């Protein structure tokens, strides 16, 4: 017996089918993933990621899980920041574990080279291949909306964090004004799939990515879900008028 349908873009699909559908999307886009992020956001995603990394403030000796870490965009930021802190105050190397469901994305990340602090593995956000209370911080950037069971992924994040551990989730969200929402919709549905078709040769995958953003819970609902998973002091910061949001919580 299967549970309630999962979302795949604007479609509702049996939950057992979604992982394969999402895997197919990222198998197809992995080779152009970072370039497409720059084109779709005009490079603004880099500012969002820099802000999220600054909020995390990686420190020497910390264990950080970069879930759905893909090509290692965030992990490299964490490694660089932790290394700078280590030069100032000493301490052990940080350890950053990139876990992603898609082997092609992990492969693309490894091809770019890897800092010594970073370890790569293929794994499911809903069933992380890690022991409980093993990490000081857990970050997931632009990945949680692709998970079949978001609530389960949040519970897994709570499980692997030590008491006092930090949770951060950077994700597309809901613009805060009607005018911005209309402009964002026009750009998303008309321009992004066309860029995908021309640059990555794949309109369908980018149509899914646009639709998946619209099906994801808004800022307040997602904050409530984080609290329901067992986190305390939950909050969020909107970026670019709510086009993206950084949610945070603590494993208290």
Image (tube, rainbow, N blue to C red):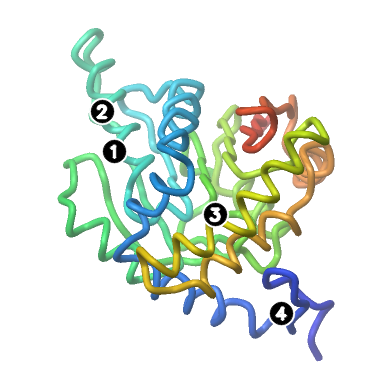
Question: Which image quadrant: the C terminus?
Answer: top right
For image coordinates 59% across by 67% down, the residue present is: 207
Dot 3 or dot 2, earlier in sequence: 2
How dense is the environment of label 3, judged by Cα within 10 Å: few (below 14), some, or many (20 and up)? some
Kindly report the distance in space between the C-alpha atoms of the residues bearing marks 4 and 3.
17 Å
The front one of 175 and 106 is 175
Residue 127 position (above or below residue 90): below
Please determine whether, in this image, residue 8 is positioned above or below residue 167. below
Q: Mark 3 near mark 2, Cβ–Cβ under 8 Å? A: no
Q: Is residue 183 above or below residue 194?
A: above
Q: Is residue 247 left or right of residue 196?
A: right
Residue indicated by mark 4: 15
Q: Tag 1: Cα neighbours inside 10 Å, few (<14), some, or many (≥20)?
A: some
Question: In what element is the residue under mark 3?
Answer: loop
Residue at point 23% right, 8% down?
Answer: 88
SS category of the residue bearing label 2: helix
Residue 49: image location, x then y, percent? 45, 33
- Outermost bottom residue: 1
Left or right for 239, reference 63: right
What residue sits right under mark 2 in the picture?
Answer: 80
Label total for image: 4
Q: Is residue 206 left or right of residue 243?
A: left
């Amino acid at each position: 017996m299967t549970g309630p349908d999962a979302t795949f873009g604007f479609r509702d699909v049996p939950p057992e089918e979604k992982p394969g559908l999402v895997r197919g999307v990222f198998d197809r886009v992995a080779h152009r993933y970072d370039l497409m992020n720059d084109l779709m956001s005009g490079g603004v995603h880099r500012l969002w990621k820099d802000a999220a990394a600054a909020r995390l403030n990686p420190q020497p000796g910390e264990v950080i899980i970069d879930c759905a870490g893909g090509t290692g965009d965030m992990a490299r930021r964490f490694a660089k920041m932790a290394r700078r802190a280590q030069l100032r105050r000493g301490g052990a190397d940080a350890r950053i574990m990139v876990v992603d469901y898609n082997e092609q994305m992990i492969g693309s990340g490894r091809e770019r080279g890897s800092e010594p602090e970073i370890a790569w593995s293929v794994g499911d956000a809903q069933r992380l291949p890690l022991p409980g209370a093993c990490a000081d911080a857990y970050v997931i950037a632009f990945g949680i909306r692709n998970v079949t069971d978001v609530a389960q992924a949040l519970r897994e994040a709570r499980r692997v964090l030590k008491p006092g551990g930090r949770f951060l989730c950077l994700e597309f969200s809901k613009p805060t004004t009607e005018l911005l929402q209309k402009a964002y919709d026009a750009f998303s549905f008309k321009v992004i799939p066309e860029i995908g078709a021309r640059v990555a040769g794949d309109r369908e995958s980018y149509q899914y990515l646009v639709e998946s953003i619209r099906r994801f819970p808004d800022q307040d609902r997602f904050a409530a879900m984080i609290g329901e998973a067992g986190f305390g002091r939950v909050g969020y910061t909107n970026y670019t008028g709510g086009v993206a949001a950084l949610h945070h919580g603590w494993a208290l």
